[in-house]
Amino acid sequence: MRFLKVNNIAQARALMREIHVDNYGIKIMAPKALACLIRINSISNIAANILKQEMLSLGGDVAIARDALTGRCKHTDCLLMGSLAQFMRLNAKLNKQPFGLDKLSRDLSVSISNYQKDNFIFKPKGYRLNLKRRTYIMGIVNLTPDSFSGDGMYSTQYPRMQGIINYIKDMIDDGADIIDIGGESSRPGAQPVSIKEELARTIPVIKKLAKKINVPISIDTYKPEVARQALDNGAIIVNDITGLRNPEMIKVISRYKAGVVIMHMRGKPQTMQDNPVYKSLIDEIIDFLDDAIKKAVAAGISRDKIIIDPGIGFGKTFQHNLIILNKLSEFKVLGLPILVGPSRKSFIGKILKAEPGQRLFGTIGASILAAKNGAKIIRVHDVKEVKQALKVFDALNNV
């Protein structure tokens, strides 16, 4: 006798095929193998009580506030408990109900579909990256003198253009799938640089690099003019740490049909670590990203060009970063590929009591957990070592 763990519907189907279940039976029963716990915020106590009774009738349950049962409160949060199959049947029962339950049914259907999605194809201009079978690596190239990790290439280590190009080629040989080039430090407390300076640092490298490599180039910037010139010279992805707050950035990305990484950050790099406080950390990040996604899609950026990033270390405390990595799978509700950048971050340094250059093993550990919890792209400095670790993870995870 064995207790089995099933992470997704594909694994449930595979187990049933293994014991020769009929195909029609697999279609019916596979959703029953997936247990789900879903939180819904602030619905009327009337709707919550109907929801509870409907789930009980299906063999599931709904946890609601005590005062919602007694009628002492008007609204309550809910925890829905059941299998995927039970939630599908619940949808059929709710879609004609009053008290907002018909809308809840539609939202629940979309959320379940998003959460189960795994066959992502990322399509920045001219590329088609299949993110289903393995975890991708985004290699970090900091063309700055003040990177927090100590790898800024405006230093004596990389005094000439050819040194930078060779470094990037080595990164690609080590397994980088995307090269992310930045000309302004986003470390906590970093001061902004002028557009002129950021362009001087990044555009010559991108222009030369685009002729020499066959992997996508990403520009790490929140400035629309820098993004525009980078896209003009060979970049095809914009990695925006401000999460498309600038409407002009959305226009640039849409015009060039570029890919985009939408990241969550509280405040600005200069102030983001000044006592960041959240009422509900994951909910607030999801709401921010969802709003940015809707703006992007409305401007003509297709969903297959969008990556989301919860922003480890950007306006987050030590505990916030741990919670995000632990609950990363909850961001799957947005139905888009997740990117995480744990590389050499301060939360690793705090755990290990180590300086940035001594955080490799901590980075590997965080990267593996991120991939296990749903990240499709990991953004790192140490490409070779993290790539090897993720190859082992992918082999084990895809059995």
Image (spheres, grey):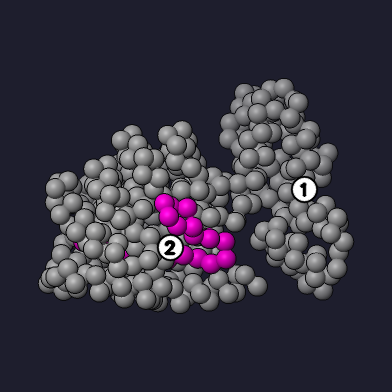
| Residue 15: x %, y % from top left | 77, 67
The reply, left or right, for residue 50 in relation to residue 298 is right
Q: Decide which of 124, 137 is in the foreground and name it.
A: 124
Report the amino acid beneath label 1.
Answer: Ala
Q: Is residue 126 magenta?
A: yes
- The secondary structure type at the circle numbered 1 is helix
The reply, left or right, for residue 354 in relation to residue 93 is left
Neighbourhood count class around disc 2 (C-alpha, 10 Å): few under 14, some 14–19, many 20 upward: many
Determine the residue positioned at 35% across, 36% down: 251
Residue placed under numbered mark 1 in the picture: 85
* Quadrant of the image occupied by residue 30: bottom right
Q: Which residues are magenta?
A: 123-143
Q: Quadrant of the N terminus?
A: bottom right
| Residue 247: x %, y % from top left | 33, 34
The reply, left or right, for residue 86 in relation to residue 300 is right
Q: Quadrant of the C terminus?
A: bottom right
Residue depth check, mark 1 versus mark 2: number of the one nearer the observer? 2
Report the amino acid beneath label 2.
Answer: Ile
Determine the residue positioned at 85% across, 68% down: 20
Are circles 1 and 2 on residues that touch, CB within 8 Å? Answer: no
Determine the residue positioned at 59% across, 56% down: 119
Residue 142 shows in this picture: no
Q: Is residue 226 above or below residue 386?
A: above
Residue placed under numbered mark 2 in the picture: 378
Q: Is residue 357 magenta?
A: no
